[in-house]
Image: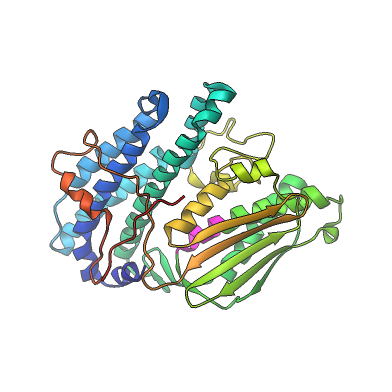
Amino acid sequence: MRDLCALGLDQQQRISHTSLLRRELCVRLAQSATQLRALPHGWADRHPFQEIINSHNHAIHSLESCPCPPDAAQDQEVTDVFKSVFEDLKVVGSVPNMLRGLQELIGELGTDGSLEITPQVNKIILNFFTLRTGLRFLIQHHVESCQGRKFGFSGSLELKCSPAKIAKSAARDSSLLCRAALGQVPRIVVTGAVHESLPYVPAVLQYVLTEIFKNACRAVVERHRVFGYDDNIPPVQCEIESTSESLTISVRDAGCGMSREQQTRMWDFLYTTTSSSPWNGEKSSGDNKSQGVLAGYGVGLPLSRMYARYFGGDLKVSSQEGRGTEVRIILSRAAFCSEVLPSSAHPARQVLPSNAHEDFSLLNMTFPGSSSTSEVHHMI
């Protein structure tokens, strides 16, 4: 995180870093395709996964054909290719397209078959989304760094990101969705270390907090619903705690709580506690569609924990049925915080260009000026 902040503020460092980033993107694109090839029942050869694998191969060849930029002019040429790869990832490998395709394929197996393969598929999809998050974040940070400094930012990183400010924004968004869906909404009260800040990507924290608040609001209204009287509904408490190493955002609700089965399956992609899924009939490919409805996609908690862990933090849930739920979002503020990638990512010769095999040593990634490599380990 420290090195990325420095790269976003120093053009010469960024240009020197472009060659390393170009090779690293090839590695991760290959690893992402490898993850999808491990899907059971030959699903890698079916829609939408075959299209995703093909687009990753195309992106690898586009990146391999770029020059290693020794100057600003060639750096711009490579940056344009980065932009093209980023736009393809937004559409072809988007969360809705991926999970809608999975839902259709799993549905073909029936109940017994789907339960049997759920752990394997969850691991593959989590690894794929983690690698994809890293790809998109590193590209976006580079591109925004090239576009000139925005006040208070280094690329896509806000240098003094305020969790309290983002929590209040996410609370407004969640409250609007809850009222539209259920007719009532609890207050969301933000307390604690409201003046603390840290380097972070505000859009990521906005997504995570909105998902958590949506769940909390729904649970509280469903348990304490009194038609027409919001004042009778217990508030959702959001408390921010600060230490030298982290900021912790605790969200507590007095809702329904989770049953034993729900707690066992809350990290499963496509598992939802609602009776109907908004995936049905949903044809849009944007990643943020899950925030446009109150519940039902089954991706909010798994993706939120994946984002928190990728940036060196964590997300923990404790719940008691009939009493409520607490979610703790832990944000690392350590200067040497490293991205966390799946250890199971490994090279696959069938998706790599012939001259790229040696680049897999770059998974332990060192940025200019860094004294240590990124920690790479399994996230679950």
Q: On the picture, is 267 further left or further right than 232?
A: left
Q: Main secondary structure of the magenta part?
A: helix
The answer to if 292 sits in the magenta stretch is no
Q: Nearer the viewer, residue 346 or 24?
A: 346
Query: Residue at position x 27%, y 50% from top?
Result: 25
Using the rendered image of the protein, determine whether residue 145 is visible from the camera's viewpoint: yes
Q: Is residue 114 above or below residue 308?
A: above
Query: Residue at position x 29%, y 68% from top?
Result: 7
The answer to if 204 sits in the magenta stretch is yes
Q: Quadrant of residue 98?
A: top left
Q: On the picture, is 373 further left or further right than 170?
A: left
Q: On the picture, is 218 further left or further right than 133?
A: right
Give the magenta-colored segment's residue range: 201-208
List x then y, in percent, for residue 60.
Answer: 23, 42
Q: Is residue 34 above or below residue 168?
A: above
Q: Is residue 271 above or below residue 132?
A: above
Query: Residue at position x 12%, y 62% from top?
Result: 70
